Image (cartoon, rainbow, N blue to C red):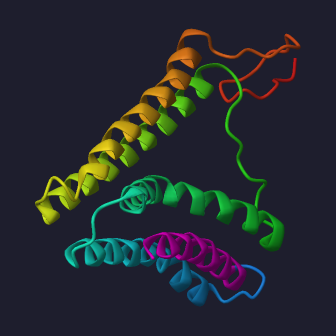
Amino acid sequence: MLLAVIAGCEIGFWVLLAAGLLARYPLRLRRTGAALLLCVPLVDLVLLAATATDLRGGATAGTAHGLAAAYLGYSVAFGHSMTRWADERFAHRFAGGPPPTRAPKYGAARVRHEWREFGKAALATAIACALLLAMIALVGDADRTRALDAWLGRLGFVLAIWFLWPVTTTLWPPRPRDGAARDSAGRARPE
């Protein structure tokens, strides 16, 4: 049952996001679009409530409960940047906005970008682990929450792997292949 709620929340996230952007740009209903976009975080609250209700009702924590915590952590940490990413593209396509910004490809700007993304991943992991620990405390029975302990390790492993990207980018920053002069954002500079 909880897996269905997680899937529904993921679908709900994208439906609310798309509806908000469609109302905001092609339909020119700015207030309606803003209201729909403000409702996107409510999806996370629905998932949190469903997970807590399931555990309080006597369920033994399983993979779905750990996945719910991970989903919530990553949704909170990356949700705003995902919304901004989609908003830039909709504004460009439907409202004559500037072209969307792209992640820098080279140099110090690329290094900063990788560390910023890692920071979001660390925040997501911290939120997810806090939720897992809260679920463990809420249930108060080690036998019923054994699966959640394993999720703490999994999330730590994912973060450790993610850490490799900013470290390797810092040690060996990507450089353009063609040898053209580049600015700090990685764009070719006119000679």
Camera-nearest residue between 91 and 145:
145
- Residue 111: x, y in percent? 56, 24
Front-lying residue, 141 or 104 = 141
Q: Quadrant of the C terminus?
A: top right
Left or right: where 12 falls relative to 44: right
Judged left or right of residue 37, residue 130 is left
Q: How many marks?
A: 0
Furthest-front residue in this view: 143
Residue 120 appears in which quarter of the rendering? top left
The residue located at (22%, 59%) in the rendering is: 144
Question: At 10% from the left edge and 60% from the top edge, which residue is drawn?
Answer: 140
Q: Which quadrant of the figure contains the N terminus?
A: bottom left
Identify which residue is drawn at 76% across, 20% down.
182
Above or below for 102 versus 60: above
Percent of width and height locating residue 35: 51, 85
Secondary structure character of the magenta stretch overall: helix
Q: Is residue 86 inside the magenta stretch?
A: no
**Range drawn in magenta:** 1-24
Judge from the rendering whether residue 8 lies leftward or rightward of residue 183; answer left or right: left
Going 21% across and 74% down the picture, which residue do you hit? 58
In magenta stretch: residue 21: yes
Residue 65 image offset from top left, x and y in percent: 36, 62
What percent of the width, then of the height, locates residue 126? 31, 45
